[in-house]
Image (tube, rainbow, N blue to C red):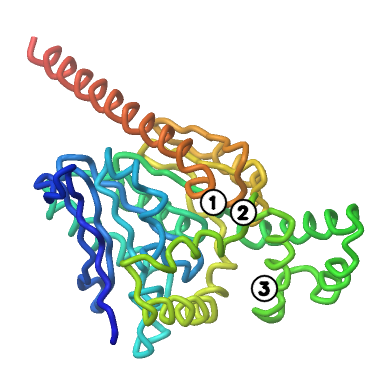
Amino acid sequence: MMFKSFTPPYRDQKRKKITSSIAVLEKIPLGGISQSVLIRSRDTKHPLLLFIHGGPGHAQIGFARHYQEELEKHFIVVNWDQRGSGKSYSKRLDPASLTIEQLVADAHELIIYLLKRFGQKKLFLAGHSWGSIVAALVAKQYPELIHAYIGIGQMTDVEHGEMISYQMVLIYARQNEKFFAVRALNRIGYPPYRRIRDLLVQRKWLSKFGGDVRKGSLFSFLRRGLFSREYTLADWWRFFQGTRFTMKHLGPKIMQMNLFNEISELKVPAYFCVGRYDYLSPFELQEKFCEQLKAPKKDLIWFENSAHCPHFEEPSSFLVVLLRIKEETAILKRQTLSHTLNLKGALLQ
């Protein structure tokens, strides 16, 4: 018997459904194909917060709810399985449609859909890892739709980042006499890698040394979702198939990305959540990108006990950061409105 996926509704102490809440798992058309979104909040009057997941292929719907329970008390939290990923994977998907431009277009279409559905003018946009490339490009192209941009494990100059990541893993292995790691890393050589499996070798040792997740591994997050209602066993099969599919067809394009050349300015407030031990997207490049970026407001926020996934590694600290961003954005909006009204008043005098 095949169970259907769903997301549990919010209920009060008497087990009655909370009428002001929303908890839906649905498919919507984006870019000409059906894609899955998870929308959860205790109150639909909250502002929208859209997550663009990493990978490519590391879809979040299957496990993200377990780390976002508190966020759902303050935002309408939206997780989206991108085309070719998780519940949005299909073996019928044309590989040629897996382009960065298409993912940006899909994200834009999703934002328009969400704003119209909830009667809002803007939303908060968070991008993690590979998703931070898509999200940053969306924020650049459509600032009128974004309250603030939140980069998590922000990818910048991907090729340079891979070089730093490889060097740091090799140095760590030598210093700690991890001879199997040294031999494996010497065998694949410096990036750019010839084969995807060479990249996977580097990622294996990066993970063992805590450069992607400080305590545990990426599987630690997936494991929380293995018994979630949002994914069936078939969905988990799609997850792993989609990861392979998107890495094969989208991975080489990502390696060519360099946001230092693509984005010098954002017309929205920009916040960067950086794990102190992040060597998948090296923290020094994230810091440099924030320094050179022009924005109405920008901030680099360190997570001292995290590597590449601070929003999952330190969810309580991430909540505090998001609440601060929400408040600062509201203050900035009031200041801008006051300035506009004062300017109009001066012109009328």
Label whose residue precedes the other's in the sequence (1 or 3)? 3
- Residue behind mark 3: 200
Amino acid, disc 2: Val
Pointer 3: residues within 10 angstroms few (<14), some, or many (20+)?
A: few
* Amino acid type at image mark 1: Cys
Instruction: Name the residue that disc number 1 marks.
Output: 309
Give the amino acid at mark 3.
Leu
User: Closer to the camera: disc 2 or disc 3?
Assistant: 2
Front residue of this view, candidates 201 and 147: 201
Horizontal and vertical percent for residue 344?
13, 19
In primary-sequence order, the first of circles 2 and 3 is: 3
| Closer-to-camera residue (331/321) | 321
Q: Position of residue 276 (x, y in %)?
A: 64, 41
- Left or right side of 37 for 293: right
Tell me if label 1 and label 2 are in contact, CB under 8 Å.
yes
Q: Quarter holding the C terminus? A: top left
Label 3: which secondary element? helix
* Residue identifier under label 2: 213
Residue 61 visible, this orientation: yes
Mark 2 touching mark 3, by CB under 8 A?
no
Q: Quadrant of residue 33?
A: bottom left
**Foreground residue among 250 and 295:** 250
**As drawn, which residue projects farthest toward the top?**
349
Q: Position of residue 46 (x, y in %)?
A: 20, 40
First reached walking from the N terminus: tag 1 or tag 2: 2
| Residue 154: image location, x then y, percent | 53, 50
Q: CA distance from mark 1 to mark 2?
A: 6 Å
Task: Decide: is 301 above or below 227.
Answer: above
Q: Residue at x 50, y 64 (%)?
A: 223
Name the image quarter holding residue 159.
bottom right
